[in-house]
Image (cartoon, rainbow, N blue to C red):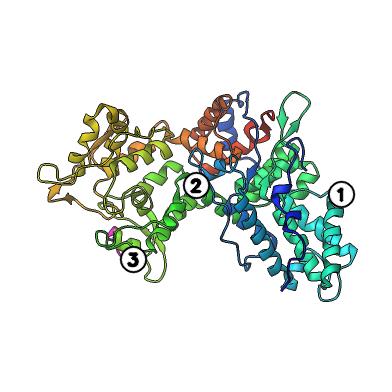
Amino acid sequence: MFYRIVSHRWLSLAGLSIALGSCGPSESESTKAASSEIGPPPTLSPESPRLRRLTRVQYTNALVDLFGDDLVLPVSLEPDVREEGLQSVGASSTSISPRGVEQYEDAAFDVAEQVVDWPDRVALWMDCDLDVEVTADCVEDLAQSLGRRAWRRSLDDEEIAALTALITSIASEADDPAVGVAYGISAILQDPRFLYRVELGTDDGSGARVLTDLELASRLSFLLWNSLPDETLLAAAEAGELSTDEGLRMQAERLLTDDRARHGLRTFFTELYQLDRLDSITKDPLVIPQSSPEVGPAARAETLAVLESLVFDEDADFRKALTTRHTFIDRRLAAIYGVPAPDVERAAWTELPEDGGRRGVLGHVSFLMLNAHNSTTSATLRGKFVRERLLCQVMPAPPADVDTSIPEADVTSPTLRDRVAVHLEDPSCAGCHELMDPIGLGFENFDAIGKWRTMEAGAVIDPAGNLDGIDFTDAWEMATAVSRHPQFGPCVAENLYQYTTGLPLGEGERDLVEWLAEGFAADDHRVRALVLRMIESPGFRQVGEIQ
């Protein structure tokens, strides 16, 4: 066990800053044909870049990559925020509060203590026995190796000297080499160059500002793995190989074949569809007896498994996510769906019945449970999700002085369709609710947790509706209407672009996003092809001028 013997302020984030100007397989024939069909990418005028704080998932992924998956990970950290519905975009507009500084400091020291207590972890970064001594060569080796991976670039002589001085002075004062090394590790992990993603670019001589190779490596790795670049990618960046389209494509395809790409994709869809909220969601057990703390995580796993399979195992048309009956459920979800459990011990794949009224992610408990109240359904929440998260249409918040409550069911208004009519009669509400409620009412055959029903308060539920001119009789038909909506594919492209850049979409980027959407359609709506097209586009390399 080591102890802290110097002022925390020496290591505090509050006293550190980064200068914005510095800081340090072959293409398929079908993709080639599609690329030629839509023409070259348009001119881009990107938004000014920002430093992006690591999200909580990225922070923990980075620690696992550096020190192993048996590490006890920190849980008390600065919370993420959403912007444009994405935590990855919110990360570019958040700072670290004084309390957050303390949390990152505590986390860094806790991780450092675990590392020095296990020789195998120390041996990953330096070849010294901490029970004997730490030589100057070992200290420099730690600074160069661990610092390089953690900060996503090589440290300069001054940075190495500062870390070396810290480690050796603390080791000498404590008369314990492990204490000095622990302070060095914690200093690396508290530094803004670890906690923030530096993707600010440099002038390429033609007036455009482009990312350096090392910044490209960081952007590529966080996009595909949601974590740090590995040694191979860092070495390729240091050799200048990412400056060419071929070199960047080669590394992108390498990363996509690694299982970590599956986890990276899961993070994108978790943010996009707000599936992280399922880990803590609750329902009134007196009204929804199927509710339990295990349902939310199981529902999240189901949706992510389906999306992952479509992208990686099938390389399928992504619109199938809304219409497939192939799903991944455990016995709890099977009970809610009214189907036999494919495995009594664990989640497994199954095919939902064609006459069950349920298919695709809009029939999953994840969507239906998230977009409902504690004990009742919500046509507004479900319709808003479809509009905003699937079609990228912004629904404004209700006026502050408007009563948004819905009357209780009675003899004259037994179903939700009857009761939400009040929204459509109020001029201050009708404009938005006419866009959301008719969609949400299409899901009324599913209760607040997603269990099928045909009656409400003794009356037959009518789930018919209309989506932008397309009539549907129920949620089954609506899934087809959403999958064929002209905004569904472009919405995926827009969100992937924002997730990649970490910035809200600017006016000067809309033409490029439209080009990406055209390519997505030309590539049969395959997400892997869209990701590679995004990586090869100017939007991946180019950033705006620093303001």
Q: Is residue 338 magenta?
A: yes
Instruction: Compare marks 3 and 1 and give the one earlier in the sequence.
Output: 1
- Please name the residue that numbered disc 1 is placed on: 158
Left/right of residue 303 with respect to residue 26 in the rendered view: left
x and y percentages locating residue 102 in the rendered image: 64, 56
Residue depicted at 41% across the width and 63% down the height: 348
Mark 2–mark 1 CB contact (< 8 Å)? no
What's the CA distance linking mark 2 and mark 3?
29 Å
Secondary structure, mark 1, is helix
* Whether residue 523 is visible: no
Front-most of residues 178 and 498: 178
Left/right of residue 232 with respect to residue 367 in the rendered view: right
* Circle 3 or circle 1, nearest the eye: 1
* Circle 2 or circle 1, nearest the eye: 1
x and y percentages locating residue 270 in the rendered image: 48, 49
Instruction: Compare marks 2 and 3 and give the one earlier in the sequence.
Output: 2
| Residue type, mark 2 in image | Glu
Figure quadrant of the N terminus: bottom right
Instruction: Compare marks 2 and 1 and give the one earlier in the sequence.
Output: 1
x and y percentages locating residue 340 in the rendered image: 30, 65
Seen as rendered, the residue at the extreme left is 411
- Please name the residue that numbered disc 3 is placed on: 341
What range is drawn magenta here? 337-341
x and y percentages locating residue 139 in the rendered image: 85, 62
Residue depicted at 77% across the width and 53% down the height: 148
Q: Is residue 26 magenta?
A: no
| Residue type, mark 1 in image | Glu
- Please name the residue that numbered disc 2 is placed on: 271
| Residue type, mark 3 in image | Ala
Left/right of residue 73 with respect to residue 338 in the rendered view: right
